[in-house]
Image: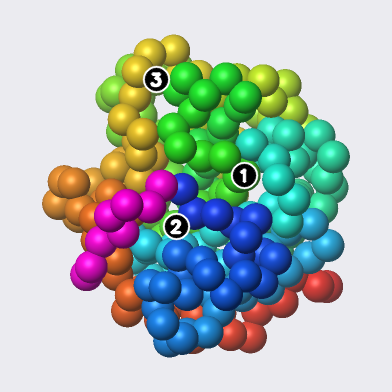
Amino acid sequence: MTGLEGTTCEDFCQELRGSEDTSFIRTYEGEPRSRIIAASSNLTLMADLSPLCTGHLLLVSNFHYYSYAAVCRDHVEEVAQVTDLIQDLYGSTFGNPVVLEHGSSLDTSGSSCISHAHLHFLPVSADRVVEAMAEDGLKHADLSSLSDLVAYEQVPYYYVASAGCRRVYSIDRSMKQQYLRSVAGKILGIPDPEWDWALVIRKECLRASMLATAHWSLQE
């Protein structure tokens, strides 16, 4: 349950390069040795360092982009193929996921601390996430495909997706840095502010996620 005081965002670039000095290695001390589940040419699936629950996974770009809007500009077919594959694997392992992203941009106002694109997969009802965001007065646009996300590359945004919808929410006012985690945490029944990734680390959830996904592959 020890927190991550003193760290900011996870340095995915460093971790993907195989560095031996990362937040993950310092936190988990070899149990497990890696949180990487599977990889495709440009994307890596891993367990969240500070998971909200078992099944909290991240799909990280292998290269440095600020958002999946930018990733989709260059790799939209791969992103679509891999996310569809993950949703199928996820559904049979943890239940149908919601996919969340806090998309950042070079304009750091509203961009939280995110500096490396990653999608969150969580066993949470997408309908409840959408309802919570509507209650908070956030406005959205429906996307017909992932290609539509590219239009948001230059601005911070929230992205919510499931098997039934893809939505982008504009960030037109000051929001808490971990807004989407706070929404998911509330739905999961996590007391405020224990959804904060820097305050509580549920190591047993990461380890359970790694065991449950040991057979997964992103190569068809």
Viewed as shown, does residue 98 lie left or right of 28? right
The label shown at residue 28 is none
Cβ–Cβ below 8 Å for labels 1 and 2? Answer: no
In magenta segment, residue 167: no
Q: Is residue 97 visible?
A: no
Q: Secondary structure at mark 1?
A: loop
Judge whether 89 appears above or below 115 on screen: below
At x 73%, y 56%, the residue is 62
Report the amino acid beneath label 3.
Leu
Q: Is residue 170 left or right of residue 52?
A: right
Q: Which residue is mark 1?
A: 117
Mark 3 neighbour class, 10 Å CA radius: few under 14, some 14 to 19, many 20 or more: some
Quarter of the image that includes the N terminus? bottom left
Quarter of the image with the C terminus in it: bottom right
Distance from Cα at disc 2 to Cα at disc 3: 21 Å
Amino acid type of the residue that numbered disc 2 sits on in the rendered structure: Leu
Residue 118: where, in percent of width, then height?
A: 59, 49
Sequence-wise, the earlier of marks 3 and 1 is: 1
Would you name the residue on which mark 3 appears? 138
Residue 12 image offset from top left, x and y in percent:
59, 56
Whether residue 105 is situated above or below residue 38 in the rendered picture: above
Q: Is residue 189 left or right of residue 100?
A: left
Q: What residue does disc 2 label?
A: 122
Q: Kindly report the secondary structure that dominates the magenta region of the rendered protein.
A: loop
- Tell me the magenta residue range: 1-8
Mark closest to the chain's N terminus, 1 or 2: 1
Residue 114 percent coordinates (x, y): 51, 39
Residue 6 inside the magenta-drawn segment? yes
Please say which color scheme the image uses: rainbow
Q: Residue at x 32, y 52 (%)?
A: 6
Q: Amino acid at mark 1?
A: Ala
